Every structure is written in C-alpha cells, then in structure tokens.
Image (cartoon, rainbow, N blue to C red):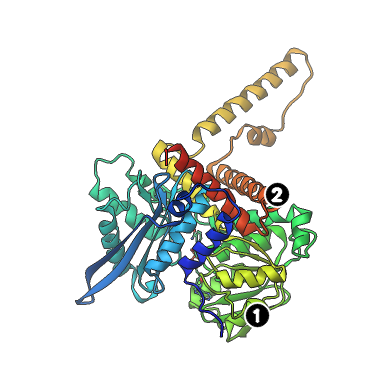
C-alpha cells in the first residue's frame, strides 16, 4: 500500500529539506528558516441576506527576515491553515530568488466568491481587511497583500480603501496592498504580470540548448504544443502571450467543469470571452469538450502549464504525465511524491518559486511607486526625454552650421524624443528579473553542489540569501 501523500505544507518542507541536505547551514538556522513564524486565524460575522454568516480567514507570516512581508490573499473553499502556511513559505523563497526585499506571507478566506454578489463580497472583504489591518497584518511597512486565486484588482481596491479609512494620517496608505487598479494607485502591467513572467521564464529556458536537451526539446517556442490547466488570471495571460507573441499552440485547456481539446490550437482570446459570457468552457465551438478534465494532464504535449491550484499532479497520476517540460504557473501543483516520480522519468520542472514570481516582482514596483509618490519611471522618462532632445538639437545645429541640410523625419524625431512609459519599464524590469533569477538557479543546477533539478537549485539560491540576511542580523 502506498504511503499517504504529504500535505501541501509538508510537501514544501520536504522540498526545502532536499535543498538543505546539499548545503552547509549552521545548526538551528535551518530550522529557523523552515518554520512558519505565525498564523493568525480570524472568525468574523457579517449580516447578509437577513442573517449572520460567519467567515473564517487566515494570514500567515512565514519569515520576517525582511519587512514588509508579502503574499496574496486567496478566496477559495480549500483555504486552510496548512494551505496558507505552505503558500507563505513559498513566498519567502520566491522573494529571495527574485531578490525582492520582502519576507513571506499569505492569507486566505474560506469562501466560494461565486456564491456572493459584488455588494456582499465588498462587505465581506472590508470586514476581513479590518480584522487584519487592526493587527498590522495589512500595513505598508509590515505586511502587504496582493491578489491570488479568487481575488483581483477589485478586492485590492476595497482593502486599500478600508486601510486608508482606518489610517487617515498615513501618507503611505496606498502601499498597504498591491495589485490595485491604476486609478487607486496600481501600476501598469500588474494584472498580467504573473502570466507575463511565465512567458519570460519559458523564453529564458528555451535560450539554453543544454537545458532544453534535458527535456528532449529543441528550437524555440514557435509551434510548441501547450496544455494549460486553469484559464484564470495566470493561465489566461500566459496562454495569450505564448500563442500571440511566441507562436506556441494551446492544444488543451483544463478547467473546473471539464477540458477542451483541439490539436490545431485553441483561440485563447475567444475562449476567454466565451468563459466570461457563459461562466464555463462548455459549448465552446472551436474545440472538443472532454468531461474528465484531469485526464488531459496526461495527454501528449511539449509543455504542461498547471495554472490553477496545488496538488493536481500526485503520486497517483505522475507516472502517466507525458509532457517532457512542466512549468508550475500555480503554486505547488506537483506534490513531493509526484516530484520524485517525475524526476526519475526525466521530466524537467520549472518550479513555482521561479515560474510565477512575475506577480511579486511587479508588486514590488507598485509598492515602490506608492512609497515614492511618483509615477513609476517618471523621473527616468523626463531624463531620457531631455537627453534625446539635447541630442536632436545638437544634430540640427551641426547640420545648420555646416550647411548639410539634414532633417529628421518628424515621426522619427517624435519617437526618438519619447522616454519609456511605465508599462515598458515594468516589462523590461520584469524581463531582467526573470533572466537574472534563471541564471542564478541555472548555475547551481549545472554546478558542483549536486543539485539534480531546477527546483532544488532554486531552493538553494533562495535559502542561501535568507540565511545570509539572518546571519547579518546576528542570528
Ligand atoms: N494572481 C497572481 O498574481 C498569482 C501570482 C503567483 C501565483 N499565483 C498562483 O497561480 C494559481 C492561479 O491563480 P490565479 O490568480 O490565476 O487564480 P484565478 O482565480 O484567477 O484563476 C484560477 C483558474 O483556475 C480554475 N480552476 C480552479 N480549480 C480548478 C481545477 N480543480 N481544475 C481546473 N481548473 C481549476 C478556475 O476556474 C480559474 O479559471 C494559484 O496557484 C495562485 O497561487 C497567482
């Protein structure tokens, strides 16, 4: 009989243990880094539909080696202490890997958001935010949430507003949460940041022939067959960018209510519109519907992108997974047991702490923007514009002085003199971050440490950095 599958938090700890076995950490420090510092559980009542409903929520703080701590707030019925603690730990390692100066945290509310209308969700969210903010579990300098499964810009705007109402004298109130709409202090490019990061991660992977060869792949992303699970914020944006900009083909989409298959490629944008209109993937005319969605995880493809939730690839189905490359857009989609089976099969896994770090990276830019009270890159843009204007003027003066008659086409002149806008800066900052983090992970993967896979390499890089911060604090 097979041993029981470890819980999500146990899985993360086991992955951590694999990495520290290859490291030389001082006694005690290993345990200090691994454990979750605290988890706050709250139960609160909200009067709705003529009666009182009691909701249970959590905010877990895994590591405060850097503050504020950072991590999303999830709305789902699966939310539990174990889940938020696992997700908070992943946040610690993720932030260290992409060098965003945050500790790790995560929150969640046990709720199916589809069961409540917008007004009810606002009341519930504001009350939850109040409960967390009054204990500094939402705070620009201490704990900064962001969107996750089941939440988005709308919920973040309510949280920001609730915090601001409770802290009217806090000039940095907007920095208490990221992932806000632009008009509430958000940043261009945050909504799609996690999916964009998945695209940049894959592009970086495909730049290295040796890495591709380990997965038995070659060439670039053009024409590669992708199966994606979860066409929500992360899955949709990743699938959209990879098909529209890299020429990949989405041959399968797995959702809650089944799956869609089309070997010729599923039009992602049209499917998303269909889902928004009908609330389901059923009835979409440009692909075949399959009732048992999970079976599609096992279909032939080049790249599998689990982008829905944790624990979908387990000891039970791991041996049947055919994809040579899996990129964990979701947090923890592969259990520890499944990870072992896949490693033995030679499947290459781009781990969650790297693959979905685009969200926290751009959240960092948003937080910095809020604290600096200036549009991201505004000073840089002004400087760029002034420099190019001076160049154009110099060129025109030279031309006039020497009677050369040079004239810049007005269109070119205008483009040349325009500095980069916020979105362009966010995108290049994200691209840079994903490239640098991949390099640091890759060096360990191919280095002398004996890291057999990208996950253990990612953990080693992250743990080294967290350990260095603790050491510099005297621990
Ligand atoms: N939103 C972010 O910025 C962000 C950042 C980092 C990591 N993540 C991780 O990415 C994953 C998805 O988050 P999201 O923000 O895209 O959530 P989301 O709520 O926007 O989308 C999730 C999608 O998955 C689908 N889904 C849910 N359960 C499913 C199941 N059992 N089978 C198939 N499909 C299912 C939902 O219908 C939905 O379309 C989570 O693991 C989250 O922690 C999100």
Q: For this rendering, which residue is in front, 367 or 212?
A: 212
Are the residues at dot 1 and dot 2 in contact (C-beta closer than 8 Å)?
no
**The N terminus lies in which quarter of the figure?**
bottom right
Which numbered circle lies on residue 419? none
Specify the farthest residue to the front. 27
- Left or right: 286 in relation to 310: right
Of residues 7 and 367, the one drawn nearer to the viewer in this rendering:
7
Task: List the residue tagged with mark 2.
Answer: 448
Confirm whether residue 452 shows in the render: yes
Q: Quadrant of the C terminus?
A: top left
Q: Up-down: is 192 above or below 324? A: above
Using a 10 Å C-alpha cutoff, classify the residue at mark 2 as few (fewer than 14 neighbours), some (14 to 19) or many (20 or more): few
Looking at the rendering, which quadrant does residue 272 occupy? bottom right
The residue located at (64%, 55%) in the rendering is: 201
Label 1 and label 2: CA atoms lie apart by 47 Å
Q: Can you give x and y, in whole percent of width and height, for residue 124 in the image?
A: 29, 66
Is residue 97 among the parts visible in the rendering? no
Disc 1 is placed on an element classified as loop
The image position of residue 76, as x and y in percent, is 40, 71
Q: Would you place residue 469 above or below residue 8 in this image?
A: above
Q: Residue furthest top?
A: 401
Tell me which corner region of the image, top left, top right, bottom left or bottom right, holds residue 263: bottom right
Query: In the rendered view, does 147 fall on the left or right side of 132?
Result: right
The residue that disc 1 covers is: 287
Measuring from the top left, give residue 474's x and y in whole percent: 42, 38
Is 43 displayed left or right of 375 in the figure? left
Q: Earlier in the sequence, mark 1 or mark 2?
A: 1
User: What residue appears at the point 70 percent right and 21 percent down from the top-left corner?
Assistant: 396
């Amino acid at each position: 009989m097979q041993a029981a599958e470890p819980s999500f938090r146990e899985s993360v700890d086991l992955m951590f243990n694999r990495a520290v076995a290859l490291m030389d950490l001082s006694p005690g420090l290993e345990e200090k880094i691994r454990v979750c510092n605290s988890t706050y559980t709250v139960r609160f009542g909200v009067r709705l539909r003529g009666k009182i409903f009691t909701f249970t929520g959590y905010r877990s703080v895994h590591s405060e080696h850097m503050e504020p701590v950072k991590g999303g707030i999830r709305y789902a019925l699966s939310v539990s202490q174990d889940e938020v603690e696992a997700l908070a730990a992943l946040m610690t390692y993720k932030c260290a890997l992409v060098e965003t100066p945050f500790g790790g945290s995560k929150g969640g509310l046990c709720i199916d958001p589809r069961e409540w209308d917008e007004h009810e969700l606002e009341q519930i969210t504001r009350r939850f935010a109040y409960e967390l903010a009054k204990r500094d579990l939402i705070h620009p300098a201490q704990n900064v949430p962001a969107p996750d499964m089941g939440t988005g810009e709308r919920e973040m705007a309510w949280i920001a507003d609730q915090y601001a109402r409770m802290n009217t004298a806090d000039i940095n109130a907007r920095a208490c949460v990221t992932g806000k709409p632009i008009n509430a202090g958000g940043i261009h490019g945050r909504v799609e940041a996690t999916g964009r990061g998945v695209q940049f991660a894959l592009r970086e992977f495909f730049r290295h022939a040796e890495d591709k060869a380990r997965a038995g792949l070659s060439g670039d992303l053009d024409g590669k067959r992708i199966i994606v699970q979860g066409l929500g914020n992360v899955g949709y944006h990743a699938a959209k960018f990879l098909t529209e900009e890299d020429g990949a083909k989405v041959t399968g989409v797995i959702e809650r209510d089944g799956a869609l298959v089309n070997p010729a490629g599923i039009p992602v944008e049209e499917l998303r519109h269909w889902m928004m209109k009908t609330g389901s993937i059923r009835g979409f005319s440009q692909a075949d519907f399959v009732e048992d969605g999970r079976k599609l995880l096992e279909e032939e493809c080049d790249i599998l992108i689990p982008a829905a939730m944790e624990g979908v690839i387990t000891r039970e189905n791991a041996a049947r997974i055919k994809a040579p490359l899996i990129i964990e857009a979701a947090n923890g989609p592969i259990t520890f047991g499944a990870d072992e089976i896949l490693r033995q099969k030679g499947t290459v896994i781009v781990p969650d702490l790297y693959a979905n770090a685009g969200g926290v990276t751009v959240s960092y830019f948003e937080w910095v923007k809020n604290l600096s009270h200036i549009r991201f890159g505004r000073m840089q843009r002004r400087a760029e514009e002034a420099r190019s204007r001076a160049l154009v003027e110099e060129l025109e003066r030279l031309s006039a002085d020497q009677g050369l008659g040079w004239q810049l086409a007005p269109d070119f002149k205008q483009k040349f003199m325009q500095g980069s806008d916020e979105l362009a800066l966010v995108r290049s900052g994200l691209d840079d971050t994903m490239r640098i983090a991949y390099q640091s992970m890759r060096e360990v993967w191919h280095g002398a440490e004996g890291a057999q896979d990208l996950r253990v390499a990612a953990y080693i890089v992250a743990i080294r950095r967290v350990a260095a911060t603790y050491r510099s604090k005297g621990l």
